[in-house]
Image (tube, rainbow, N blue to C red):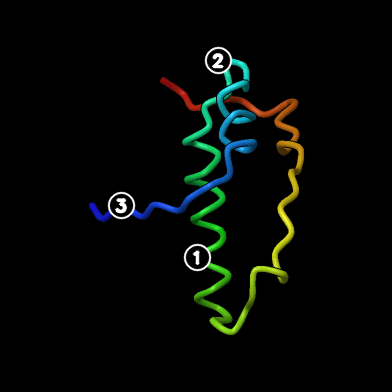
């Protein structure tokens, strides 16, 4: 698997390190990068200024049954 690295400033690195232990930062980054790549595949002319990162609430699963075992 290829690895890509990008430098980040010291303040950002410290903020990442200060996140609570229950936050699995790599999982968030994998999801963000996957979506980022999908958007660039659709339109390779996009620039960093074209991207805004936001969060959405999970879909409400109230009343739905889980997978049967």
Numbered circle sitting on residue 21: 2
Mark 1 touches mark 2? (CB < 8 Å): no
Q: Nearer the viewer, mark 1 or mark 2?
A: 2
Which residue is painted at 56% across and 24% down in the image?
Answer: 17
Counting every numbered tag in the picture gives 3
SS for dot 1:
helix
Which residue is painted at 56% across and 34% down in the image?
Answer: 13
From the viewer's perspective, is 15 left or right of 35?
right
Tag 2 or tag 3, which sits nearer the N-term? 3
Numbered circle sitting on residue 3: 3
Q: Position of residue 22 (x, y in %)?
A: 57, 16
SS for dot 3:
loop
Tag 3 or tag 1, which sits nearer the N-term? 3
Q: Which residue is mark 1?
A: 37
Crowding around mark 1 (Cα neighbors within 10 Å: few <14, some 14 to 19, many 20+) is few
Q: Position of residue 49 (x, y in %)?
A: 72, 69
Which residue is painted at 75% across and 33% down in the image?
Answer: 60
Q: CA distance from mark 3 to mark 2?
A: 24 Å
């Amino acid at each position: 698997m290829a690895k890509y690295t990008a430098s980040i400033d010291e303040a950002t690195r410290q903020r990442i390190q200060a996140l609570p232990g229950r936050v699995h930062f790599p999982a968030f980054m994998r999801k963000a990068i996957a979506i980022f790549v999908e958007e660039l595949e659709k339109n390779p002319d996009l620039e960093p200024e074209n991207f805004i990162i936001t969060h959405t609430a999970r879909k409400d699963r109230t009343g739905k049954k889980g997978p049967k075992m």
